[in-house]
Image (tube, helix red, strand yellow):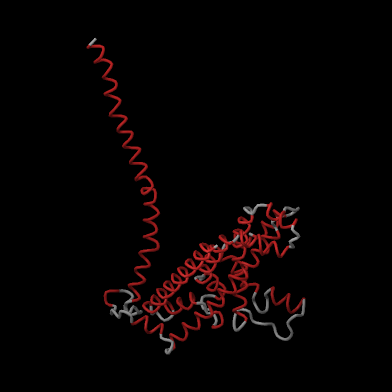
Amino acid sequence: MSRRSAHTRTPSHDVRPHSRQRRRRRRFRSKHLPYLLVVPAVVLEIAIHVIPMLVGVWMSLLELTQFHIQDWSTAPFVGLGNYRATLDVNTETGKALLHSFWITVVYTTLSVFLSWLLGISAAVFLQRPFRGRALLRTLFLTPYALPVYAAVITWGFLFQRDTGLINHVLVDQLGLVGGDRPFWLIGENSFFALLTVSVWRMWPFAFLCLTAGLQNVPPDLYEAAAIDGAGFWWRLRSVTLPTLRPINQVLLLVLFLWTFNDFNTPYVLFGGSAPQEADLISIHIYDSSFSTWDFGAGSAMSVALLLFLLLVTAVYLIFTNRRRHHA
């Protein structure tokens, strides 16, 4: 009996260590595996965003001009001197930056509003199924799918004064503009040309997000509103917009940040140097850094812009969260 009992106990002693090891592995995986999966993303985020941002902050504290660009160690430390020089509205540099800031605010406000308005209009129009709806959705998303540089370069050709399609249609075909052909890429019209390209590029993204949000609206709400005698505008105001409120909160913030920081569109459209009427702050910072070779002042403007956008984002999120809690 003793031999049998010993023989029967040995497998149990062999199984227990293996089961303990498996439990330890499972605990390790459950506790540490999520962090290990996040490590590559954190490393890339630090390398691509955090380190360049810290370098930019350090550059803003130096008098980093063309005389010291080869050896940063020789650049004098000026502390907040670059911020005082660029943010002082009594100086020419400060006045130019303030002018560019207000141009960017107006441009961003109009672009975001028009992009959202076109997006919600197209999304509501294509909400109900009909023949050709898939084709229209594809056409509406084409501007968002095109490469930025190819699309903006094409618009640059369309806005040419003598050979552009815009003047050909407005002046030659429709006769809406009399006299000489207008300039679209210089002078006062440059702002409207830039706004047109921005809205054309951004509204398909708003349309895509709002279309996805409308798929979650229960049809019973529209049927109940129709039974109560509600018209189109009442249903839009009382059913559609309240349902899309969470999506609109995120969408407006994303559109604001993208448009306010937009550099590719004005840079490609105007060939690197924008007119005064379309001098966005991103182009202004680029010109201040690479045209005058004053990288310290340009870095100070960039850091100030970053702080402004962080402040606007924080205020917007606090305001929207309070409205959500009250609702």
Please give the name of the residue rendered at 25% of the width and 14% of the height, measured from the top-left corner. 5
Q: Quadrant of the N terminus?
A: top left
Q: Nearer the viewer, residue 199 or 248?
A: 248
- Residue 96 on image: x %, y %: 47, 85
Which residue is outermost to the right?
174
Instruction: Provide residue 192's location: percent of width, then percent of height.
Output: 62, 77
Q: Residue furthest top?
A: 1
Write the residue at 35% across / 64% down.
51
Measuring 73% from the left and 63% from the top, which residue is drawn there?
232
For the C terminus, give its image quadrant.
bottom right
Q: Nearer the viewer, residue 223 or 5?
A: 223
Horizontal side of residue 166 vs 145, given as left or right: right
In the rendered image, which quarter is residue 114 located in?
A: bottom right
Q: How far across and how far down the image is residue 126, in percent?
A: 70, 57
Quarter residue 159 falls in: bottom right
Residue furthest to the bottom: 90
Question: Total of numbered circles in the picture?
Answer: 0
Q: Nearer the viewer, residue 23 or 2?
A: 2
Q: Residue at x 35, y 76 (%)?
A: 60
Residue 73 placement, left or right of 150: left
Residue furthest left in the image: 2
Q: Quarter of the image holding residue 295? A: bottom left
| Viewer-proximal residue among 306 and 182 | 306
Residue 269: x %, y % from top left: 57, 73
In this rendering, the answer to whether 10 lies above or below 113 is above
Q: Is residue 53 above or below residue 29?
A: below
